């Protein structure tokens, strides 16, 4: 399954024994200089907690709209972080990750 995110970018979903794995590819042709932020790093970290994500977002809200060298937003990286997604599925409540997502979309609704 491939779905277009924005110009020259796609997500490839590949089935594995753990479920779907997201492979980001491409590069966005925007006029802003790429910058990898603490939020990018945390969104890729398999051991990150929703509270750490929220803390990083609140300390630099502009990081929500920042694209890294490959043109990815932090949200793209988080959506490919199998460990965080699996942890969230096993929890009795999803409030923490859901709250982070709501805050993220509040600061960067595009």
Image: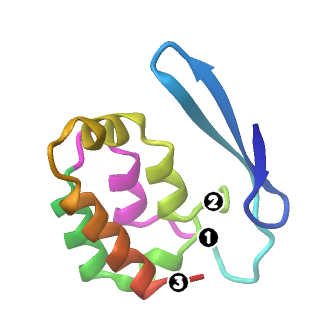
Read off the magenta span: 34-48
Q: Is mark 3 on a helix, strand or loop?
A: loop
* Mark pair 1, 2: CA separation: 5 Å
Image point 81% across, 71% down: which residue?
A: 29
Image point 77% across, 66% down: which residue?
A: 6
Left/right of residue 41 with respect to residue 50 in the rendered view:
right
- Residue underneath mark 1: 34
The disc label shown at residue 5, or none: none
Position in image of residue 11 (x %, y %): 70, 46
* Mark pair 2, 3: CA separation: 21 Å
The disc label shown at residue 109, or none: 3
Q: In which quarter of the image is residue 100?
A: bottom left
Position in image of residue 53 (x %, y %): 26, 63
Mark 1, Cα crowd under 10 Å, few <14 / some 14-19 / many 20+, is some
Q: Which of 102 and 92 is in front in this view?
A: 92
Picture layout, residue 25 above or below residue 27? above
- Labels 1 and 2 touching (C-beta < 8 A): yes
Whether the magenta-drawn stretch holds residue 37 is answered as: yes
Picture layout, residue 8 above or below residue 56? above
Picture layout, residue 98 above or below residue 78? below
Q: What element carries label 2?
A: loop
- Residue underneath mark 2: 69
Q: Is mark 1 on a helix, strand or loop?
A: loop
Left/right of residue 38 with respect to residue 1 in the rendered view:
left
Residue at the far front in the pictured view: 92
């Amino acid at each position: 399954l491939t779905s277009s995110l924005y110009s020259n970018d796609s997500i490839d979903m590949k089935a594995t024994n753990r479920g779907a794995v997201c492979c980001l590819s491409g590069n966005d042709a925007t006029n802003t200089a790429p910058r990898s932020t603490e939020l990018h790093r945390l969104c890729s970290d398999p051991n990150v907690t929703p509270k750490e994500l929220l803390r990083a977002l609140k300390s630099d809200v502009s990081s929500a709209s920042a694209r890294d060298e490959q043109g990815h937003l932090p949200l793209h990286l988080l959506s490919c972080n199998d460990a965080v997604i699996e942890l969230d599925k096993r929890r009795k409540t999803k409030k923490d990750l859901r709250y982070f997502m709501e805050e993220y979309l509040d600061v960067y609704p595009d």
